[in-house]
Image (cartoon, grey):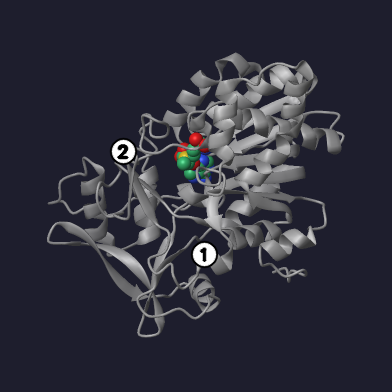
Amino acid sequence: MMRNNTPAALETDSQDTYPVDENTATPRCLVSHLKTKISTTGPLPFDKWMSDCLYHPQWGYYSKGDARVGRSGDFFTSVSVGKCFGMLLCYRLADYARVNHIEGQFDLIELGANTGQLACDILDSLRSDFPHLYKKVRYTICEPLASMQKVQVSTLKEHSAIVEFHATLSGIKQAKKHGILLSNELIDAFPVKLITKKDGQWRELHVVNHNDDFTSITEAIHSPQLLESCNNLPPLPDGYTTEYRPGLEAYAKVCASVLEHGMVLTIDYGHIRSDYYAERRTTGTLRTFYNQTADETPLVNAGEQDITAHVDFTQLALAYQSAGFEPQYFDSQSRFLIQIAKPWFKAIENKQQAPPAKLIRQFQTLTHPGMMGNQFSILECSLNHAPDKAVLAKLELPEALTRK
Ligand SMILES: C[S@@+](CC[C@H](N)C(=O)[O-])C[C@H]1O[C@@H](n2cnc3c(N)ncnc32)[C@H](O)[C@@H]1O
């Protein structure tokens, strides 16, 4: 059964009942689960494969609850660099509350919180640097995986009085909120469809089991939504393989449904449309991560490695727009953090103390163009605000959106 209001990434159909051949062994691991599924339901569209590999409730990469992210895991994020990232985001959140004259409760909602470390860093900084605002904050984490929620509860025990947990955004039943919905490296973990150009036509990749090995075949595209997206791509040569991320509109709609006023602040790696589908990216942006090593082998190590694809920020901004959010800011992590760090540097100057060396080193890692500064982008989209025209242009979006 598909649950209509579940955000796209975790809409794994692994909870579906699918017929199991009496002679087939009951799946005991992800590989045998996937084999059974393919033998009973046929070739598996790549997004369904990716969904099971990452989020199968028992064997999915993210469902197991052990350390996947961080220096000892398979890859690290801006959060793993240290407390500086959360501290600076806290400055941005405080500035938003000041400019928008937030008097009552200030809601912060995070998706893809993983271990809860970013939430903890933000709340630690809020408590020490903005104690009045800290008292107004309610921090909600939406985490569908029970194993991860357990880890988050433990990471955030010091802030338990102001932290709430929900399985899904749509599960938040209280009155609509005024606040910020934030995520770091969430969208890149949403499953993608793989498409390839063959004889002038776009085709979709499906996973099959050939002689006990997973491999891919291409099939004609039947989904009208995918066909429309393919038709909107620039002319690209035969053999070009890339991704399309379905479900962003559904995700954006759920985001809008929990906020009365506020914005979504999305941090991720990706490109605007013309760069994403540039002719030179002949094999797309899909990557796998295992033990700090990047590769492009999504059909091996099922459930043992991360599978990710860059974000098409034009597609994402368009999805937010169709849900009522309007783009206000889009820039590199480097420029974003340098801008929001100004009060921090001023505070250091005023105290006339030597800057804390550890935090400065983290700041450099996060902002240096050769490290994380240019790898990530920040997109801010607000409800009840006209779009910023310069930001629309940056995102290659028209000034007037034809709403569906
Ligand atoms: C790359 S990790 C995020 C890392 C973390 N935010 C950080 O900065 O270190 C992606 C996370 O998104 C979560 N996720 C994927 N789809 C989700 C959804 N629809 N709702 C909530 N979390 C989701 C995954 O379970 C995983 O924990």
- For the residue marked with disc 1, what is the amino acid? Tyr
For ligand 1, tell me if the residue under mark 1 lies within 8 Å: no
The reply, left or right, for residue 52 in relation to residue 141 is: left
| Residue under label 2 | 291
The tag earlier along the polypeptide, 2 or 1, is: 1
Measured from the top left, where is residue 32 in percent x and y? 20, 48
The reply, left or right, for residue 86 in relation to residue 202 is: right
At a point 60% along the width and 36% down the height, the residue shown is 110
The reply, left or right, for residue 381 in relation to residue 157 is: right
Secondary structure category for the residue under label 1: helix
> Which mark identifies residue 143?
none
Residue 208 falls in which quadrant of the image? bottom left
Measured from the top left, where is residue 362 in percent x and y? 55, 30
- From this viewpoint, which residue is outermost toward the bottom? 199
Q: CA distance from mark 2 to mark 1?
A: 26 Å
- For the residue marked with disc 2, what is the amino acid? Asn
Foreground residue among 86 and 374: 374
Measured from the top left, where is residue 53 in percent x and y? 34, 47
Foreground residue among 3 and 339: 339
At a point 38% along the width and 36% down the height, the residue shown is 63
> Which mark identifies residue 276?
1
Q: Is residue 16 visible?
A: no
Residue 181 higher or lower than 313, as above or below: above
